[in-house]
Amino acid sequence: MKRVLLFTVLLIQTAFVCFGQETGNSVPASTNVAGADYPRIDPQHRVLFRINAPKATSVVVSLGNTALTKGDDGFWTGRTVPQTPGFLCYTIKIDGVELNDPSSETFYDAGHIYSCIEIPEQGVDFYDVKDVPHGDVRSVWYKAKSTGETRHAYIYTPPGYDQNVKQRYPVLYLLHGMNQDRRAWESQGRANFILDNLIAQGKAKPMILVMEDGGLAGINLAAHRSQNPAGSANGAAAQRPGGMDPFWNGFTKVMIEDIIPMVDARYRTLTDREHRAIAGLSLGGAQTYQISETHLDKFASIGVFSAAPFGFSGIATAYNGLLTKPEAFSKQVKVFYIGQGSEEGANAGRAIHEALDKAGVKNVYYEAPGTAHVFQTWRKCLYGFAPLLFQDK
Amino acid sequence: MKRVLLFTVLLIQTAFVCFGQETGNSVPASTNVAGADYPRIDPQHRVLFRINAPKATSVVVSLGNTALTKGDDGFWTGRTVPQTPGFLCYTIKIDGVELNDPSSETFYDAGHIYSCIEIPEQGVDFYDVKDVPHGDVRSVWYKAKSTGETRHAYIYTPPGYDQNVKQRYPVLYLLHGMNQDRRAWESQGRANFILDNLIAQGKAKPMILVMEDGGLAGINLAAHRSQNPAGSANGAAAQRPGGMDPFWNGFTKVMIEDIIPMVDARYRTLTDREHRAIAGLSLGGAQTYQISETHLDKFASIGVFSAAPFGFSGIATAYNGLLTKPEAFSKQVKVFYIGQGSEEGANAGRAIHEALDKAGVKNVYYEAPGTAHVFQTWRKCLYGFAPLLFQDK
């Protein structure tokens, strides 16, 4: 079996046994790779590190910019200050070189692959894996006819989907942020567990979630071979000619002409606009404004989480002026939900919410306490948004 | 949108534009993260690197132990010797510190998270993403009653599964190697594309693939919160008390009492032994010998890829002596397939194949040309094995 070890184990490794450091009531992070005892988290949300780097002269963890201390055994240990609960990405800097922690799972965020750690929040368990029926998250490849690309989506089908073969389901299209991809809402956002738990409690209707690569290019099969099965769409992708345009008109076109028709053909969906919602975080929130504005015939519910305001042109002009007729708007838009973190500026949503209120447009506003532009905010936004959907049908 | 950049970009980064190095006919690796132009692969299977590390004094890539050369711009460039085609994991060593390449997607292998690169093999395209109908790979969470754990599986349902709601399908249980997990056969092995392509050509029957965490612990919900949604099962896992026992008796029990009943209850399977097969690579091959030996009532076809021979006790005793009665064995075992790479020793399969031949036991033997104990071997084994399955029904 040793042949499986294809190359030497990394010099920088987290130890599997703990000694030489007071671990108290700390437990290994749930984001560790199988068997890794470090990093550990204590009840005060401090993170304990223990890293083997006998030749290093300095080891600093980016969480709280924490310098570790070298022991006689060559292991560097240390504890961060208390961290804000949620999902945090980090690096380890060894002699000035920043690197990922081989003991943590990695995630695609901010355009790179990063080590990240889950810090449990006291009293908050709506995104935990619980003993409830679980939906499946499917890795789905399909041909996008409008672009000729082969594209990749993650699609959540709710518990019971495979058993209730005559039932059709409403659909929430859930968009990620800039320099993230289809994986973010599952891996970082835990959207599947949020829905599993809400559905089990009867708080949300069983629904399908669709997560795609907003604005990233798919695969042009004529030009590529042996494409990445697990990862992002490749090729020119985010850097392709046209700057940000693929994120606006490009993705809108793919959404309307490819993604929605594929989902409606391949899965048992309810295909009227009343049973279709769209929501997104950050860049995905701005896309949500833009896509729903030009295609209000396709979506009856809208969720915008920590969106940059440039997706929204203002009360007078957004939605083709429909916001100036609040009653007409509310007749079309069943749920208009705006959320952000309390540690973000008002431009992440609060300002638009206040303008909507002032204009008499019905909307739901939520502010996640104590968090900024991070997934803990967006998990809570989804948790607030999903129960409002598809309830009058 | 800049707020999405949650922390400073890694010091070590691959440039998005190329200059200062002859790139020839090279193309970005399909395993790169979106937008990354390096690493690149040329037609001679050499890998080109370009890494920004202005403060470093040495940069060495583990592929061919290739030392890069520093340019005046602070970028280190270099080209490896020709690499064996297939899926290769690697590290970059900067001033003696080994780290992952933030421009490559990462994969769980050898018990760690590694950067890996796909080197296309000339004339070999059976695992490429093609313009054919694609099955879904589902991330599936379920309660294992025999252990009380919540466990995680990846399950491939073939093209048409959601449309042909009255059709039931045969199942291949596909086991990973040591220090891998449920993700390996999809991410590294491209099992879903191999099946998509074989099914589209009419060479393999549409079948379900089940990939689980052989031998790793699932999640004990009583003890854990906010478990890893994307990654491995956590907790004690591979290091839990009992040494290798969880990989033998432990996993056999989970397979028989939990995984198979869950799959048969949740998906439209054919539940007789003639429509159930088991195969595995390396440790998973040894598990395949053990599980099929004690549960021949459950599996009618067996595939063993590069297995350590200690899963197999010898002609006289394996399968409770049934190999000494070749006709009786062949009546029960429809396909007995043994594969390995030509660059592995005879103990990876050839020796057992020769012993079976000598004993008159019908078996299929395959040797992947030019590869060793790597996924390129196992992709080819699956490509040879899958078409033999479920053909006489």
Image (cartoon, coloured by chain):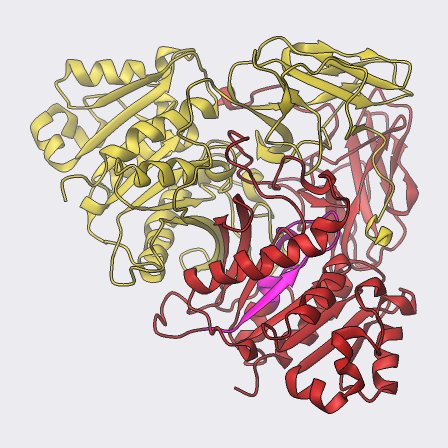
Chain colours: A red, B yellow
- Residue at the image position 74 percent from the left and 75 percent from the top: A319
Q: Quadrant of residue A387?
A: bottom right
Question: Looking at the image, is B355 positioned above or below residue A228?
Answer: above
Total numbered circles: 0
Q: Quadrant of residue B307?
A: top left
Question: Left or right: where does residue A195 sit relative to residue B66?
Answer: left
- On the question of residue A27 being in view, the answer is no
Question: Left or right: where does residue A282 sit relative to residue B304?
Answer: right
Q: In the rendering, at what x and y percent does residue A80 appear?
A: 87, 47
Question: Looking at the image, is A150 positioned above or below residue B50?
Answer: below
Q: In the rendering, at what x and y percent does residue A75 appear?
A: 81, 29
- On the question of residue A283 being in view, the answer is yes
Q: Is residue A170 magenta?
A: yes
Q: Quadrant of the N terminus of chain B?
A: bottom right
Q: In the rendering, at what x and y percent does residue B342 appear?
A: 38, 12
The residue stretch that appears in magenta: A169-194
- Residue at the image position 51 percent from the left and 35 percent from the top: A221
Task: Identify which residue, B321 or B358, lies in the foreground.
Answer: B358
Q: Is residue A297 magenta?
A: no
